[in-house]
Structure formats: structure tokens, C-alpha cells
Amino acid sequence: MQNMEELYQMIAERQKNPKAGSYTDYLFTKGLDKILKKVGEESTEVIVAAKNPGDDELVYETADLLYHLLVLLVERGVSFDQIKTELAKREGKMSDYKDRPEIDNL
């Protein structure tokens, strides 16, 4: 199908030239709060899918999450190139991540 950059460009184009009735137009019309809600929902669905056996649900939910993340980036005006640049900065570097104690009560 499309690579992530092409999907990003398609979403950006839809923001500039809305297609009435499309889901992408719906998200942009509803605004940042709706987009953030969807990113949160899809993130949770990826986590649940990852805990279940089989990969089909995980693949499906990951695709949903990536789509909604790209909509968020377009909404905020963050380019795909900015993300690629940030990832490139991290290439070959050791992580600064430190183990933290588990959170028992959410």
C-alpha cells in the first residue's frame, strides 16, 4: 500500500483540501481534543492486542494507531521529516532510559 511518508502527505493534503464525509475530514473538523482521544484509545487497543495470542489484531490496531498519530502530527504542524531527523539523532546511541519501579496502582 503506502509508506508512512506517503500516508502523512495524503493526510496533510486532506487537511488542506477536505473531502466531505471522510473520516480524516471528521477528525480535523472535530479538532485536537478528538484526535488526542483517538490516539489514546488506539494506544490502549494496541496494548490489549499485544497481550492476546495471534498477530492479526495487533497488526490491525497498530495500523489504526499509526494513522491517528500521523493525523496528530499534521494537526500540530509537525513534519514527518522532523520525526525522521529525531530518530536519526538516536541511531547508535545508548539509551538514557533508567529502570523505574513498576506502578502498581493506576
Image (spheres, rainbow, N blue to C red):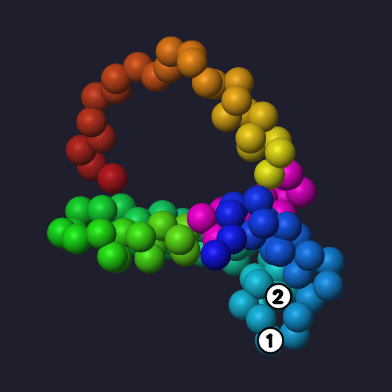
Extreme left residue here?
53
Residue 30 sits above or below residue 78 on the image:
below
Label 1, on which residue? 21
What secondary structure is marked by label 2?
Answer: helix
Q: Position of residue 16 (x, y in %)?
A: 84, 66
What range of the chain is rendered magenta?
66-79
In the image, taking residue 87 as reference, residue 104 lies left or right, namely left
Quadrant including the C terminus: top left
Q: Secondary structure at mark 1?
A: loop
Can residue 30 be seen in this snapshot? no
* Residue that lies at the very extreme toward the front in this rendered image: 1
Say which quarter of the image contains residue 81: top right
Q: Residue 43, relative to residue 85: is it above or below?
A: below
What residue is drawn where x is 47% and y is 64%?
64
- Packing grade of label 1 (10 A; few <14, some 14-19, many >=20) is few
Which residue does the image show at 20% across and 53% down from the upper left? 51
Q: Is residue 16 visible?
A: yes
Amino acid of disc 1:
Gly
Res 36 quadrant in image: bottom right
Reply yes or no: does residue 14 show up in magenta. Answer: no
**Residue in front for this viewpoint, 5 or 105:** 5
**x 70%, y 36%: residue:** 82
Are the residues tagged 2 and 1 within 8 Å (C-beta)?
Answer: yes
Provide the major secondary structure of the magenta segment.
helix
Image side of residue 21 versus residue 42, left or right: right
**Above or below, 6 relative to 88:** below
Q: What is the number of the mark on residue 25?
A: 2
Tell me, yes or no, whether the highlighted magenta stretch contains residue 78: yes
Please provide percent x and percent y for residue 28: 71, 68
Q: Residues under labels 2 and 1: Cα distance?
A: 7 Å
**Kind of residue at disc 2:** Asp
